[in-house]
Image (cartoon, helix red, strand yellow):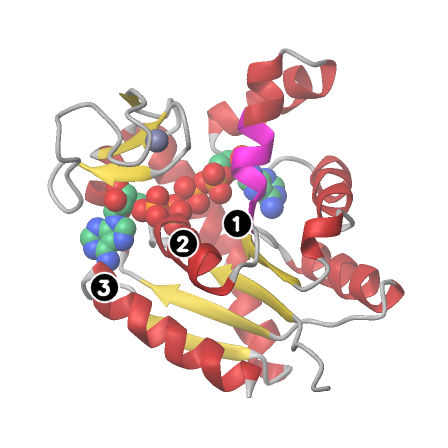
């Protein structure tokens, strides 16, 4: 019997690059869970837990949540049963220390990273993508007032949930998030390129075209 290939993937890219949009489609096609540290953190904040209270100010300012907190959230999640055939990380790692800690954790779980897909988009496009992004309160899917309109204004196509604007998708906070990305996260492109794990994609193309390019990369990783 041939063994099923484990697919441990990372989507890397600046805020607004389209990581979440693509990750949701990939999760459905390949049956591996999308793990968004941003979503996990926002859920924690909504639950009103003490951990959530600690996360709030970092997220609202557009800075990174400290590594210790972020790592404990992420490691608890990837140890769950639904990750045993693989997972798709969206928004993690965001700095070199997180990447190194992930590598150690995967070694300890007797597994390894399959590949990293980097979505490249210029800052000028990211500002308009994020300013007009709307998120579903029910399922977290993201829409855009111009590029990915819901069929009915203000409502999610999948679950009918109400669409809202994230507080950190305001112009001032977006600028800080982009600064943080260039200073702390962009160095991961070289980090994974040196490890021969990186595939780059032009994130300025249409959503469907990017999806088919990502599927080609994943199919090669699987074979
Ligand atoms: P990220 O998860 O990387 O922050 P999202 O997937 O939430 O990014 O996408 C950011 C915004 O851009 C959303 O409003 C989304 O609908 C829109 N978007 C995603 N991919 C594209 C694309 N290829 N072209 C135009 N807009 C896009
Ligand atoms: P984006 O649309 O920018 O990709 P995310 O939902 O991934 O947004 O992240 C939103 C915020 O959550 C970040 O600005 C940061 O404050 C926090 N965050 C998410 N993931 C991480 C991480 N891996 N390390 C530190 N902070 C994180
Ligand atoms: Zn929804």
Query: In this picture, which residue range is highlighted in magenta?
Result: 34-42
Residue ID for mark 3: 208
Residue 31 sits inside the magenta stretch:
no
CA gap, disc 3 to disc 1? 21 Å
- Judged left or right of residue 102, residue 10 is left
Which secondary structure type mostly characterizes the magenta part of the structure?
Answer: helix
From the image, state whether disc 2 or disc 3 is nearer to you: 3
- For the residues bearing labels 2 and 3, Cβ distance under 8 angstroms: no
Outermost residue toward the right? Answer: 108
Q: How many marks?
A: 3
x and y, in percent, of residue 32 in the image? 56, 58
* Image height of 100 relative to 162, above or below: below
Within the magenta stretch, is there residue 40?
yes
Report whether 40 appears left or right of 161: right
Does the residue tagged 2 have its C-beta within 8 Å of any atom of ligand 1? yes
Pick whichever of labels 1 and 2 is earlier in the sequence: 2
Q: Name the image quarter holding the N terminus.
A: bottom right
- Label 3 crowd bin: few (<14), some (14–19), many (20+), radius 10 Å: few
The quarter holding residue 103 reads bottom right
Identify the mark at residue 19; answer none if there is no mark: 2
Residue 107's place in the image compared with 82, above or below, is below
Q: Secondary structure at mark 3?
A: helix
What numbered label is drawn on residue 91? Answer: 1
């Amino acid at each position: 019997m041939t063994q099923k290939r484990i697919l441990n993937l990372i989507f890397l890219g600046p805020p607004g690059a389209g990581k979440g949009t693509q990750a949701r489609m990939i999760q459905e096609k390949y049956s591996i869970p999308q793990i968004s540290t941003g979503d996990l953190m926002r859920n924690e904040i909504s639950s009103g837990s003490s951990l959530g209270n600690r996360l709030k100010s970092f997220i609202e300012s557009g800075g990174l949540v400290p590594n210790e907190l972020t790592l404990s959230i992420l490691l608890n999640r990837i140890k769950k049963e639904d990750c045993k055939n693989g997972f798709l990380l969206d928004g993690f790692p965001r700095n070199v220390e997180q990447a190194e800690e992930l590598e150690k954790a995967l070694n300890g779980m007797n597994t390894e990273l399959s590949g990293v897909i980097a979505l490249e988009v210029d800052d000028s496009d990211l500002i308009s993508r994020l300013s007009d992004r709307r998120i579903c309160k029910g399922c977290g899917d993201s829409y855009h007032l111009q590029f990915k309109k819901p069929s009915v204004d203000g409502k999610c196509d999948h679950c009918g949930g109400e669409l809202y604007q994230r507080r950190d998708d305001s112009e001032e906070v977006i600028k800080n998030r982009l600064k943080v990305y260039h200073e702390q996260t962009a160095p991961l492109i070289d980090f994974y390129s040196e490890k021969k794990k990186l595939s780059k994609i032009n994130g300025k193309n249409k959503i469907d075209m990017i999806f088919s390019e990502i599927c080609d990369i994943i199919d090669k990783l699987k074979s």
